[in-house]
Amino acid sequence: MEETLFKAPVASIEAAELALPTLEDLDVRLISPTEWRVSDSRLSDDDARSVLGFVEKSDERFNAMRMTHGHGVTWSTFCTMEDALASFTQAVTAVAAA
């Protein structure tokens, strides 16, 4: 069922050297009728750090689960798939516990 929506060319780059991905760097693959895996195409498919997270369509919303390797996950909800994907190109802001 996996279907690639778009994929940029792979280059051999260390994750520590990477800037935040751009939309063109995202590899978005359909894994179910309502779910997509979002990866950084600049890293090899066999590198776990390439997986940035997942997007799920729920009703008329798109829920993005962003994996922040070593720092847990963040969840966000968006009105469009484009906005959900754009969230993977932005820095995660740490939220202090109250």
Image (cartoon, rainbow, N blue to C red):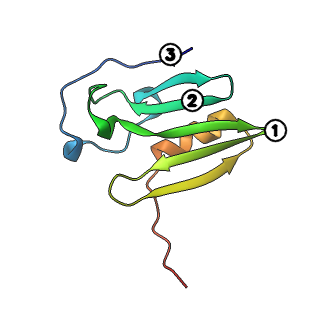
At x 23%, y 23%, the residue is 11
Q: Position of residue 3 (x, y in %)?
A: 54, 14
Res. 32 image quadrant: top right
At x 26%, y 42%, the residue is 18
Dot 1 or dot 3: first in sequence order is 3
At x 18%, y 38%, the residue is 14
Res. 9 image quadrant: top left
**Mark number, residue 27:** none
Real-space Cα separation, disc 1 to disc 3, in angstroms: 23 Å
Q: Position of residue 49 (x, y in %)?
A: 30, 40
Q: Position of residue 72 (x, y in %)?
A: 42, 58
**Mark number, residue 4:** 3
The N terminus lies in which quarter of the figure? top right
The C terminus lies in which quarter of the figure? bottom right
Compare residues 67 and 90 and report the one nearer the observer: 67
At x 42%, y 32%, the residue is 39
- Label 3's element? strand
- Label 2's element? strand
Dot 2 or dot 1: first in sequence order is 2
Q: Is residue 46 left or right of residue 71?
A: left
Compare residues 86 and 97 and report the one nearer the observer: 97
Give the residue pinned by disc 2.
36
Residue 69 sits above or below residue 82 on the image = below
**Mark number, residue 59:** 1
Real-space Cα separation, disc 3 to disc 2, in angstroms: 9 Å
